[in-house]
Amino acid sequence: MDKISPEARSRNMSRIRGKNTEPEKYIRRLLYHAGFRYRIHFRELPGKPDMYFSKYRTILFINGCFWHRHEGCRFATTPKSNREFWESKFSRNVERDKAVYEKLEKEGYKVIVIWECTIRQMMKDERHEKKILIELIEDIRDNTVSYKEY
């Protein structure tokens, strides 16, 4: 049973955004300061990626662990109430993500996914931020990478 009222749950859920989230803005700021230029939420590509680097034919998705089901992550919990609904919703999200990534790869794009938990860790630890940022920059520029997750 849910611990809060349906009205409070609805209010909480209505505040969850799909675009321009804090993790998204954080990664955009880091990459912009590293000299990268990109398009955000580019509608002409499948899945409307969070960031598109046309110079490198690279797509960057910033995925929330809860909504996109980051395997093994502590943030990828399933609500106890209305389990069937949530499990169905999550499986559709995962299937859609997989189809979008495959389509982009077939069209010759590199796909990079950064998970919310990785970004949270980057925000807390400057050494981890630098390590991931260096790897990310190398992967954006690298033509041999076709799919990568952080």
Image (cartoon, rainbow, N blue to C red):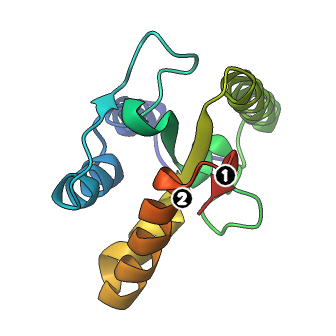
Q: Is residue 122 above or below residue 86?
A: below
Quarter the C terminus occupies = bottom right
| Classed neighbour count for the residue bearing mark 1: other residues with Cα under 10 Å, few (<14), some (14–19), many (≥20) | some
Instruction: Give how far across and how far down residue 45 sits, in percent.
Output: 51, 16
The three-letter code of the residue at mark 2 reads Asp
| Residue found at x 66% / y 25% | 104
Q: Mark 1 points at which residue?
A: 145
Is residue 18 among what the camera can see? Answer: no
Q: Which one is in front, 4 or 114?
A: 114
Relative horizontal placement of residue 90, taking residue 8 as reference (left or right): right
At horizontal 76% and vertical 67% (from top left) the residue drawn is 72
* Residue for point 36% across, 78% down: 129
- Position of residue 92 in the picture relative to residue 14 (left or right): right
Toward the top, the furthest residue is 44
Relative to 74, 38 lies left or right: left
Q: Where is residue 86 in the image (x, y as percent from the top left)?
A: 72, 34
Q: SS at mark 2? A: helix
Dot 2, how many residues are within 10 Å of its Cα: few (below 14), some (14-19), or many (20+)?
many
Pick the residue in front: 81 or 71.
71
The kind of residue tagged 1 is Val
Q: Mark 1: which secondary structure?
A: loop
Which numbered disc, 1 or 2, marks the residue that appears first in the sequence? Answer: 2
Q: In the rendered image, which quarter is residue 111 located in?
A: top right
Residue 47 lies in what quarter of the image?
A: top right
Q: Which mark is on residue 139? A: 2
The furthest residue to the bottom: 127
Image location (x, y in percent) of residue 144: 67, 51
Question: How many callouts does the rendering have?
Answer: 2
